[in-house]
Image: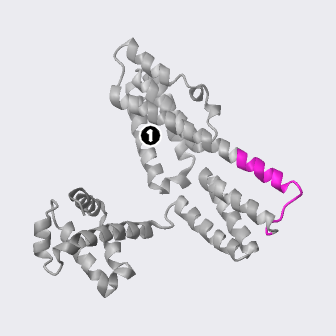
Amino acid sequence: MPKSSSNDLFVLIKSLKKSEKRYFKVYPSRRAKGELIYIRLFDAIDKQSKYNEPKLLKKLKTIPPARLSDLKNYLYQMILNSVESFYAGNTVTAKLKKLLSHAEFLYERSIYSQCAKILSKAKHIAYKYDKYLQLVEIIGLEKALYIRGGMQGTGNYMENIIWEKKMVLKKLDNEIKYKDLRYTLFNHYYRSGITRNEKEVNAYRKIMSSDLCSQESKALSYNAKSDFYFVNGLYYYAVKDFKNSFIYYQKLVTLIESHPERLHEQPEMFKYITALSNYHIASYLSKNY
């Protein structure tokens, strides 16, 4: 394992929470006699304040130097697999992945009625949380199921599901465009900060000239709307229009708080905390106490 890769393993181990480290060491597969060497290697690296391979080999005398690289490579993958297992089912995306896996298995075994039930459950969750990538996959499997005769529907079923897929792809495309706009604006703000002259104001206006910024109705989903509010809030903050910045950050906070079921996922909670922080800053600067 090259030096940079060794540092990658060290950084990965140091990034783990206590609960994640504990899970890695008690996970059933770690209890096998052959796996104990990885626990020892894990603990030895974890105790180092800075990665030091000579000291590591000195402490783990039973590990031949020639084997260390392979052991570290395998340990790296073991940790990632363990973390994946630890969080399996804790996110909406993970739940949908599991449901789709079950549905595909049932489809392959021609157990169509059970497959249809799982797809119905997965579709309900996907629509609730705007998981459009997964919806495309779900609809594709529903089409295949209908062709096999395992999906009940009216004579217009195929036309309806084709239309449904088009609508889902439209929302997915819309969401991606707003995300790209958010990244573009944030990157510009990161490099340029708050405006100091008309030239810098015009640079921001050029980014905001996108048709996506013209009106809220252009945003077709929860995620697109949250990006619309964020982009406008940041734009007005950057050009020192703190009153309008406050208005859009307030709308963003209201939107997030109207969907509390989403806050159990870490990215959404981070978005909420950031939105609250921006809201309070804009409130202070605009004197909306």
Vertical side of 182 occupied by 14: above or below: below
Q: In which image quadrant can residue 95 be found?
A: bottom right
Residue located farthest toward the top when viewing the structure as drawn: 198
For the point 30% across and 84% down, the residue is 34
Residue located farthest toward the bottom when viewing the structure as drawn: 33
The quadrant in which the N terminus is found is: bottom left
Q: Nearer the viewer, residue 156 or 269?
A: 156
Q: Position of residue 39 (x, y in %)?
A: 26, 76
For the point 40% across and 12% down, the residue is 198
Q: Amino acid at mark 1?
A: Ala
- Extent of the magenta region: 150-166
The quadrant in which the C terminus is found is: top left
Q: In which image quadrant can residue 108 be found?
A: bottom right
As for residue 155 lying within the magenta part, the answer is yes
Q: In the drawing, does residue 158 fall left or right of residue 174?
A: right
Vertical side of 118 occupied by 232: above or below: above
Q: Nearer the viewer, residue 2 or 31?
A: 2
Vertical side of 83 occupied by 238: above or below: above
As for residue 261 lying within the magenta part, the answer is no
Q: Position of residue 202 (x, y in %)?
A: 44, 16
What colour scheme does the image use?
one colour
Q: In the drawing, does residue 105 fall left or right of residue 88?
A: right
The answer to whether any part of residue 131 appears in the image is no
Please count the marks in the image: 1
Q: Position of residue 161 (x, y in %)?
A: 77, 53
Q: Position of residue 46 (x, y in %)?
A: 21, 67
Q: Please, what secondary structure does the residue beneath circle 1 have?
A: helix
For the point 42% across and 48% down, the residue is 270
Residue ID for mark 1 = 275
